[in-house]
Image (spheres, helix red, strand yellow):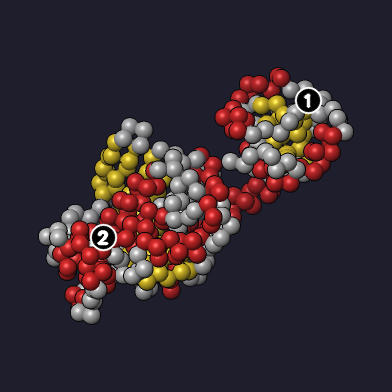
């Protein structure tokens, strides 16, 4: 237990009640942990960015394990679509701030944990101040701007950054800690992918149980660094494939030319991470294209009620169509559209529709390039239809 990141002087004032001794007994009887290890856990502070799919198991298990202080950053509100994996939040919490339901749930699990709430999104403006009081940062957010921000702020403040990411059936985990001799996230990925290249979980889906595996791995790594046992996941990336039920391990080397942790760093303070990840540029490029003609769900309802002659084309996938559809729509999934354009008549008026309006805008551009002229895109897609026209249509 010689490699704990917790300075021994911090253990002097740590004491346990008899209830706490009983609570942590399964730790205390392990020679690798003992009372000293448990004191280290109680002395330690961890910041978890996000209380979603990854943040849920991270926060729940760390609280149960007896971490002394847990900081949570989240500016979001609980939605029904979160409940399939975000086990910090329950059905009764839909519409509440995630931070509040997280705090209540953690209190139930272990009232001895000090929970600090940061009701905000993690940004370049607030990152340093939020990270400062903590020993370890765990990134539970899974988007590129936050991933680079959390990496850089941890390099600058010399704190380990425990990384996890999930998509569909696969996930990854690593510990980035240049202060402990390892590489950082930028040593592995100096540049973010172009925006839109890597779909998010909201676009591509994620197996609900998957963040449980990856988040628990992140929590384990935090506990190992604090107690000072085992081989930390520094300089290694573990990737997990749920369908094959296989773990694979990759070595990650420290890049001497890394722009933040290398020998001659070129980035020495926090930057604009939205800009760095190309998000405003992509939005501007989109805005400079010919505008997409739009139709509201109210206008669509009027056209349907008036039995106007037009085609309503749903470009979602068949399995989405099976969940919910707008009466009168015809299904042509976006991927099949190029080969099925002959089913459409360019003389007809065509309304395109998907889940929320993104894919149908792509479909509109495809048809416009192919010479179709009378096109419009349903703003908000079937979600807006369910919200504003027909509440019996399920949302997914
Ligand atoms: Zn680096």
Is there a contact, CB below 8 Å, between mark 2 and mark 1? no
130 relative to 183 in the view: left or right: right
Q: In which quarter of the image is residue 8?
A: bottom left
Question: For residue 356, which quarter of the picture?
Answer: top right
| Image label count | 2
The circle drawn on residue 346 is: 1
Q: Residue furthest left?
A: 31
Q: Residue at x 33, y 57 (%)?
A: 61
Residue 119: horizontal and vertical position, in percent? 51, 67
Residue 376, position as x, y percentages in the image? 76, 37
Examine the rendered structure and indicate whether residue 198 appears above or below residue 273: above
> Is 17 or 36 nearer to us in this picture?
17
Question: Looking at the image, is 322 positioned above or below residue 380?
Answer: above
Q: Residue furthest top?
A: 342
Determine which residue is flagged by label 2. Answer: 223
Choose between 386 and 144: the one closer to the eye. 386
Q: What kind of element bears circle 1? A: loop
Asked if disc 1 is less than 8 Å from ligand 1, the answer is: no
* Quadrant occupied by the C terminus: top right
Q: Which residue lies at the image location 65% right of the left edge and 31% below the top edge?
A: 315
């Amino acid at each position: 237990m010689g490699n704990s990141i917790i300075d021994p002087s911090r253990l002097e004032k740590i004491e346990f009640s008899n209830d706490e001794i009983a609570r942590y007994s399964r730790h205390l009887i392990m020679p690798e942990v003992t009372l000293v290890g448990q004191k280290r856990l109680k002395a330690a502070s961890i910041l978890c960015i996000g209380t979603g799919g990854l943040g849920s198991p991270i926060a729940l298990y760390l609280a149960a394990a007896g971490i002394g202080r847990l900081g949570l950053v989240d500016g979001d509100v609980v939605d029904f679509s979160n409940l399939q994996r975000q086990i910090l939040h329950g059905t009764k919490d839909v519409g509440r701030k995630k931070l509040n339901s997280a705090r209540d749930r953690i209190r139930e699990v272990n009232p001895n944990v000090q929970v600090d709430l940061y009701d905000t999104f993690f940004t370049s403006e607030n990152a340093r101040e939020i990270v400062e009081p903590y020993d370890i940062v765990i990134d539970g957010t899974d988007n590129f701007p936050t991933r680079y921000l959390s990496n850089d702020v941890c390099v600058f403040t010399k704190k380990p950054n425990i990384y996890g990411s999930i998509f569909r059936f696969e996930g990854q985990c690593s510990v980035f800690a240049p202060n402990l001799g390892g590489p950082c996230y930028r040593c592995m990925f100096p540049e973010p992918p172009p925006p839109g290249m890597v779909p998010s979980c909201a676009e591509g889906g994620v197996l609900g149980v998957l963040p449980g595996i990856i988040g628990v791995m992140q929590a384990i790594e935090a506990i190992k660094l604090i107690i000072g046992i085992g081989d930390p996941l520094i300089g290694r990336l573990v990737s997990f494939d749920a369908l094959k039920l296989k773990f694979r391990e990759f070595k990650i080397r420290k890049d001497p030319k890394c722009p933040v942790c290398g020998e001659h760093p070129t980035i020495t303070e926090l930057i604009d991470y939205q800009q760095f990840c190309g998000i405003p540029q992509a939005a501007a490029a989109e805005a400079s294209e010919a505008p997409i003609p739009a139709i509201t769900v109210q206008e669509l309802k009027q056209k349907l009620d008036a039995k106007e002659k037009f085609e309503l084309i749903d470009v979602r996938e068949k399995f989405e169509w099976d969940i919910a559809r707008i009466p009168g729509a015809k299904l042509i999934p976006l991927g099949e559209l190029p080969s099925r354009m002959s089913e459409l008549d360019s003389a007809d008026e065509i309304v395109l529709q998907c889940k929320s309006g993104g894919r149908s805008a792509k479909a509109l551009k495809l048809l416009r390039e192919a010479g179709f002229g009378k096109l419009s895109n349903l703003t908000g897609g079937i979600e807006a239809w369910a919200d504003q026209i027909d509440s019996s249509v399920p949302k997914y």
